[in-house]
Image (cartoon, grey):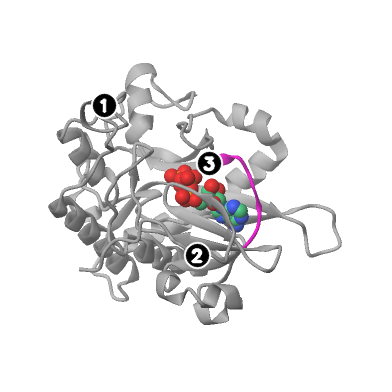
Amino acid sequence: MPSALLTTDLQDLTLISRGKVRDVYHTSSEDLLLFVATDRISVFDVILKDGIPDKGKTLTRISLFWFEKLKGIVPNHLVTADIDEMPEEVRKYKDQLDGRSMLVKKAKVIPIEFIVRGYLTGSAWAEYKKTGTMHGMPLPEGMVESQRLPQPLVTPSTKAEQGAHDENISPDRAGQLIGSKVYTRVADIALKLYSTAAEYAYSHGLILADTKFEFGLIPSTADTSEDEVILVDEVLTPDSSRYWPLDQYVPGKPQPSFDKQYVRDWLVSVGYRKGLESGPGGSGEGWGIDEAVIQGTQRRYSEAEEMLKNESPEA
Ligand SMILES: Nc1ncnc2c1ncn2[C@@H]1O[C@H](COP(=O)(O)OP(=O)(O)OP(=O)(O)O)[C@@H](O)[C@H]1O
Ligand SMILES: [Mg+2]
């Protein structure tokens, strides 16, 4: 098995940010960034000590697949994922970067995560149980865990600074933060993206329970002064989305899934809880992952990719 690439080391390029999963670099073109998906995995916003070998490549392939499918709805940041087409200073690191990198348009990232939910699960289910609402919006009474929502809804959250947790907010609050005109326009795009993707996934045996989109603004190429909205970051990957096997879907309980939920559940089973982010017992050593769980995660991510790309699905 290949080893996991936890951090890139590209000495001649300038690192802009090391996110939980991605290393982002400047390139020789001022308006283009190098966007590299490492094999790091974060759960509960904590980066684990061990990575998932080649996860960054799987995430990159899945994002590319969806960028292509969804480009009719909104333009995206992808310029190329072919290393040989990238600037000279990038090409020389081909061995580290191949298959896990995209050259992208540098955008002013809109500081809201556009989560779209079609099913009641995760933090939305936790809130509903307490107050009957989802991000402050009322939902019908008597809903059960994992139930399909009457209609998909955008449930925004703030994009927290590094180290902090994203916070669920109401659409009204999001409108206050970024301007209600921009919010409404982008939320509408997010809904269209979700619905198109969910329908496609369903026909391939997968329920897309929810997902998170990020958008950015770039100066318009047309003569108008308005910035252009583009889809940025990763899209519809098992890191940013909940995918459930359709043939095992039973509302009223948690669902088996192809996403990080598997690692979250395992981490909790070995003692993780809020307050112990620094390691078992608060040790400061960080949290590792058992080999079997690494392989189980790889298997789930690959299976999701195969199902999405299956050209003759039975469903
Ligand atoms: N086209 C772009 N221009 C500028 N920044 C971008 C672009 N696309 C994505 N980004 C930003 O690059 C970073 C990607 O790193 P990563 O996915 O590791 O992020 P993170 O925010 O730390 O983690 P998480 O995805 O769990 O919130 C994000 O902060 C994202 O907003
Ligand atoms: Mg991210």
Asked whether, in this view, residue 120 is left or right of residue 158, the answer is left
Q: Which residue in the rendered view is the most extreme toward the bottom?
A: 84
Circle 2 is placed at which residue position?
10
**Amino acid identity at mark 3:** Glu
Q: Which mark is residue 81?
A: none
Count of numbered circles on the image: 3
* Image quadrant assignment for residue 309: bottom left
Question: How dense is the environment of label 2, judged by Cα within 10 Å: few (below 14), some, or many (20 and up)?
Answer: some
- State the residue in front, 274 or 16: 16
Q: Is mark 3 within 8 Å of ligand 1?
A: yes
Q: Mark 3 and 2 residues: CB-CB less than 8 Å, in contact?
A: no
Task: Name the N-terminal-most of marks 1 and 3.
Answer: 3
Task: Name the N-terminal-most of marks 1 and 2.
Answer: 2
Report the Cα–Cα distance between label 1 and label 2. Answer: 33 Å
Asked whether, in this view, residue 117 is left or right of residue 91, the answer is left
Circle 1 is placed at which residue position?
282
**Amino acid identity at mark 2:** Leu
